[in-house]
Structures are given as C-alpha cells and as structure tokens.
Amino acid sequence: MADADIDDVFQEVFVIVHRKLPELDANVVLRAWVYGICLRRAANYRKRNRARKEIPTEEAIEHVEVDPKSPAEAIDARKARAILEDILRGLPDEKREVFVLYEIEELPMQEVADAVGCPLHTAYSRLYAARKLIHEGIRRARAQMGNR
C-alpha cells in the first residue's frame, strides 16, 4: 500500500467501525472484528490499484527516514524486504491474510480465524500452505541471486 493512501484507507476503516459498532455481537472478539474490516479494506484497495504507479515527490523523498545500519546492511535489508513483499503479494489473499495476522501481527490463531471468517482448522491449513509457498519463494529468490 502506498504511504500516501494509508491515511485514506485507515479513515475508511474508522468510519466502518464507527458505523457498525452498535450492531456488533457481544460474543465477537473486537480486535478480530476490526482486523477483519482492515483486511477487507486492504483487499479492496489492492483490487482498485493493481496497475497504479506513483512517482515520489520531492516532499516524500525529504521525509525518508535514514537507517542507522551500514550501507551494505541497509541494502541487504531492503532487498530482503522487497523479496518478502513480492512473495506475499503473490500469495492468494486468504493465505496472505492468515500469514500476516498470525506471523507478523502475532494474533492468536482463533482471532485470526475470526478476523478472516473461517473455521480454526481452515486458518491453520491456510497458514501451513502460506508458509510452504513463502519457503518456495525464498528458495527461488536465493537461486536467482546465486545465478547472478
């Protein structure tokens, strides 16, 4: 998601939460419910903006944070992050959502299942499949880097 759009999508999430909160079932975990809304808004954003390209402005470039790592470490970290982002982008939505919520956001698996709207065992299956696809993607990236 482009940094310029994060505030807009966040505002959409806030409006939806505010509008639908009175209808929330008391048995639903609030955090999982909000994550579910976030996932759907992010998916909608990706669908709308697949081909959209942005050119950084001078103002955006001025606000780039300086990383205290050595230049070589910073380059390696950026490459690793770019590879992971590419791999995640290539995953089917349902697998990526479970992986991100469980592995990156560190939600308990029951909350992940609630957020994505699937049974607990299905969430575990999606996580297993996502991990397998990510490991395959990492192996491919390493092989490509070794061939250079």
Image (tube, rainbow, N blue to C red):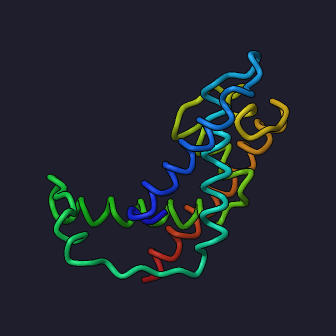
Instruction: Give the residue at the far top of this rendering.
Output: 26
Residue at 20%, 58% in the rendered image: 65
Nearer to the camera, 42 or 142: 42
Estimate the x, y position of residue 7 in percent, counting from the top left. Answer: 42, 54
Residue for point 56% across, 51% down? 12
Give percent across and percent down for residue 139: 57, 63
Q: Residue 46 placed where, x, y %?
A: 61, 66
The quarter of the displayed image where residue 80 is located: bottom left
- Give the tally of numbered discs: 0
Residue at 36% across / 82% down in the picture? 55
- Residue 10 drawn above or below residue 83: above
In this view, the residue in front, 53 or 143, is: 53
Q: Give the position of the C terminus as an image quadrant.
A: bottom left
User: Could you tell me which residue is drawn at 63 percent across and 25 percent down?
Assistant: 30
Q: Is residue 46 left or right of residue 65?
A: right
Left or right of 4: which side holds 118?
A: right
Q: Nearer the viewer, residue 87 or 117?
A: 117
Q: Quadrant of residue 18?
A: top right
- To which quarter of the image does residue 36 belong? top right
Name the spot of residue 57 as percent of width and height, x first.
26, 78
Q: Tell whether 145 sits left or right of 86.
A: left
- Please tell me whether residue 148 is drawn above or below residue 96 in the rendered image: below
Front residue (pair 16, 94): 16
Reply above or below: 25 against 70.
above
